[in-house]
Image: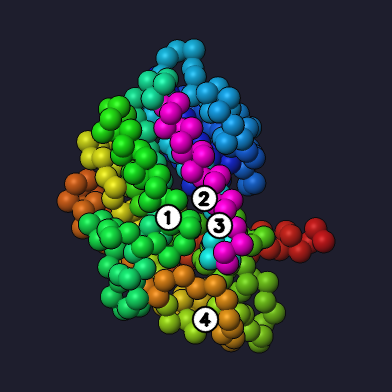
Amino acid sequence: MKKALVLGAGGFIGGAMCKRLKSEGFWVRGVDIKYHDFFDVVEVCDDFICGDLRDREVVQRSMQHEQGPFDQVYQFAADMGGAGFIFTGENDADIMHNSALINLLVAEQALATGAKRVFYSSSACMYPEYNQLDPSNPKCSEDSAYPAAPDSEYGWEKLFSERLYLAFAKNHNLDVRIARYHNIYGPEGTWQGGREKAPAAFCRKVAEAENNTSIEVWGDGSRTRSFLYIDECIEATRRLMESGFQGPVNIGSEEMITIQDFAKLAIDISGKNLGIKNIEGPLGVHGRNSDNRLYKKMIGWKVSEPLRDGMERTYLWISQQANLHRDQK
């Protein structure tokens, strides 16, 4: 039986990956500083370590298995959140220190314990700001990463850690796979508290709004993004991990939408009559859209989930969570 280690298993993507690996017959160990908020990790992990991956001893213990090295290690653990967390500047030191420290220790211990393959989840936030000034035509092909100029410390740390794993591959033959995720969303993710991303934030705002009122949208709504549903993220990641291609490679949707239209989509799905009030707030780059040509060429698969379909499932789940939260008050 193949063994998989999922770091960041208490989070959104990590938890979903644990479910997928378990369904494929892997022996799965999850590790995180917290348990998952929306399901019992014991049900989808054969073993779970609740510990701080900034601690070398925790990383060492996580990487060790009595039956030998892990066949696959998935590194999702990071100090992160949506625009309201990573673009204010107030969390920059923690973001860089915590995430970089985790990746330094993971790379070190993956090599020391003989891990057979390591996946690192990078982010489209590492792409240069100067290529994302035109909302209608952002450039996010993998070869556009340099000269480097991310628009946030979160993006700089992601770029550093990409290079860290690539350096371990070059100098120490660590077998790595690297993906640059583009705005992954779906049920069973953070939907309140300040770290949620735009899809969850809009679903929550709409779900909590009284009919014939309005929701707030940061900025004028003209900025563009694409969003990838969690199931397709996991499928694309598994295909990359089983391939012979190292990456880095984009994993995202090419269905770009303005933030204003995205908010309108959430409102339309709800069936409510709501307006939009544009206010000042952290915004990020003007435009971002996944360029999937390299993934299609090297892996031979493409995402196909329409944004509306994924948002309908996400809105239903978040509206249920909002109702439960309201009833508990």
Q: Which badge, 2 or 4, comes first in the chain's sequence? A: 2
Contact (Cβ within 8 Å) of mark 3 with mark 4: no
Residue position marked by numbered label 2 in the rendering: 96
In the image, 187: left or right of 133?
A: right
Type of residue at label 1? Trp
Three-letter code for the amino acid on which mark 4 is drawn: Gly
Q: Pick the quarter of the image with the N terminus.
A: top left
Total number of numbered labels?
4
Task: Tell me if residue 74 is in the magenta stretch.
Answer: no
Is 301 on the left or on the right of 49, as rendered? left
Numbered disc 3: secondary structure:
helix
Discs 3, 2 touching: Cβ within 8 Å: yes
Q: What residue span does the magenta drawing correspond to? A: 88-110
Residue depth check, mark 2 versus mark 4: number of the one nearer the observer = 2
Q: Quadrant of the C terminus?
A: bottom right
Q: Which residue is mark 4?
A: 219
Tell me the residue at 54%/61% (across/down): 86
The span from disc 2 to disc 4 (Cα, nearest Å) is 26 Å
Residues at marks 2 and 1, CA–CA distance in whole angstroms: 8 Å
Q: Name the residue rendered at 17%, 51% in the picture.
A: 297
* Residue furthest to the left: 297
Magenta segment, prevailing SS (helix, strand or loop): helix
Q: Nearer the viewer, residue 215 or 151?
A: 151
Q: Residues within 10 Å of mark 2 (few under 14, many from 20)?
A: many
Is tag 2's residue or tag 1's residue first in the polypeptide sequence? 2
Q: Tell me which numbered mark, 1 or 3, is placed earlier along the sequence.
A: 3
In the depicted structure, whether residue 186 falls above or below residue 54? below
The answer to whether residue 196 is seen in the rendering is no
Label at residue 156: 1
